[in-house]
Image (tube, grey):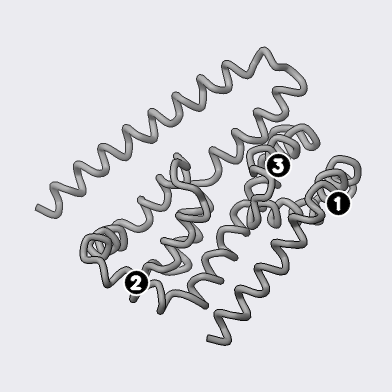
């Protein structure tokens, strides 16, 4: 109980700080962020961990500041570190409680068991096509039995395309808005390729288990 309370209070305190000073942090990033990429990455991590401002906006700002390449890198590191921190906090403080809740619902328990058998690919795809809110996905993954290593690798790799998209869109809007349509076309094409690969993998996996 003390462990749960400590984690809740810690996250609540940091979350309130980020909320109160969110505009100051944005202003600092815009004016002084280029002077310290490390501090900017820490700020990006805080905004990913506590999305008081939608993270795609943060990624866009970083893309404008640093350009598509460095902006994507900072956005990706911040988002990846934040998701790992969230995973560890929930796993460390709430997994026992979460597992009891999951076990009460047979359908959810079966879904979780199926997920755990295909954890890497499921996490990877969920990051590539972020339909489920990140905080919901992070919480569910942390409550499962998937290892930290598998989660970190799949999540970190899977985040690369969307983080590149956020920073590239920001940079393109500022420097060459006419290219935005082509960025969208490229990304949609990329998602179609990912979906096709996933469907092929899913069919082969299904055949192997029947």
Expressed as whole percent of the image width and height from the top left, the position of residue 152 reads 50, 60
Expressed as whole percent of the image width and height from the top left, the position of residue 136 reads 47, 55
Give the camera-side residue of 70 and 128: 128
Residue at image position (63%, 80%) is 6
On the image, numbered disc 2 is attached to which residue? 101
Expressed as whole percent of the image width and height from the top left, the position of residue 1 reads 52, 86
In the drawing, does residue 206 fall left or right of residue 146?
A: left
On the image, numbered disc 3 is attached to which residue? 58
Give the camera-side residue of 204 and 133: 133
Say few, some or many: other residues with alpha carbon within 10 Å of mark 1 (under 14 / 14 to 19 / 20 or more). Answer: few
Say if mark 3 contacts mark 1, CB within 8 Å: no
In the drawing, does residue 181 fall left or right of residue 148?
A: right
Expressed as whole percent of the image width and height from the top left, the position of residue 200 reads 25, 38
Q: Earlier in the sequence, mark 3 or mark 1?
A: 1
Residue at image position (60%, 41%) is 163
Q: Earlier in the sequence, mark 2 or mark 3?
A: 3
Say few, some or many: other residues with alpha carbon within 10 Å of mark 3 (under 14 / 14 to 19 / 20 or more). Answer: many
Q: Is residue 33 above or below residue 39?
A: above
In terms of image quadrants, where is residue 73? top right
Say if mark 2 contacts mark 1, CB within 8 Å: no
In the drawing, does residue 109 fall left or right of residue 174?
A: left
Return the mark for residue 36.
1
What is the distance, in whole Å, between disc 3 and disc 1 at their CAs? 16 Å
In terms of image quadrants, where is residue 104? bottom left
In the drawing, does residue 185 fall left or right of residue 46?
A: left
Return the mark for residue 137.
none
Q: Circle 1 sits in a helix, a strand or a loop, which is it?
A: loop
Say if mark 2 contacts mark 3, CB within 8 Å: no
Q: Earlier in the sequence, mark 2 or mark 1?
A: 1
Given the current orientation, which residue lies at the most extreme bottom position?
Answer: 2
Q: Circle 2 sits in a helix, a strand or a loop, which is it?
A: helix
Give the camera-side residue of 172 and 157: 172
């Amino acid at each position: 109980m003390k462990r749960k309370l400590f984690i809740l209070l810690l996250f609540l305190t940091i979350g309130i700080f980020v909320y109160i000073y969110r505009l100051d942090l944005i202003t600092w990033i815009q004016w002084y962020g280029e002077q310290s990429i490390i501090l900017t990455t820490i700020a990006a991590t805080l905004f990913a961990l506590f999305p008081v401002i939608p993270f795609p906006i943060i990624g866009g700002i970083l893309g404008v500041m640093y350009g598509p390449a460095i902006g994507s890198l900072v956005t990706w590191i911040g988002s990846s570190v934040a998701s790992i921190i969230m995973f560890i906090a929930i796993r460390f403080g709430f997994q026992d409680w979460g597992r009891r809740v999951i076990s009460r619902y047979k359908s959810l328990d079966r879904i979780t068991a199926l997920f755990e058998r295909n954890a890497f690919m499921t996490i990877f795809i969920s990051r590539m096509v972020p339909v489920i809110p990140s905080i919901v996905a992070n919480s569910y993954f942390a409550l499962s039995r998937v290892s930290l290593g598998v989660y970190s690798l799949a999540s970190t790799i899977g985040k690369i395309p969307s983080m590149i998209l956020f920073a590239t869109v920001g940079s393109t809007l500022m420097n060459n808005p006419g290219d935005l349509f082509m960025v969208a076309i490229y990304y949609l094409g990329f998602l179609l390729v990912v979906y096709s690969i996933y469907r092929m993998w899913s069919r082969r996996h299904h055949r192997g288990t029947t």
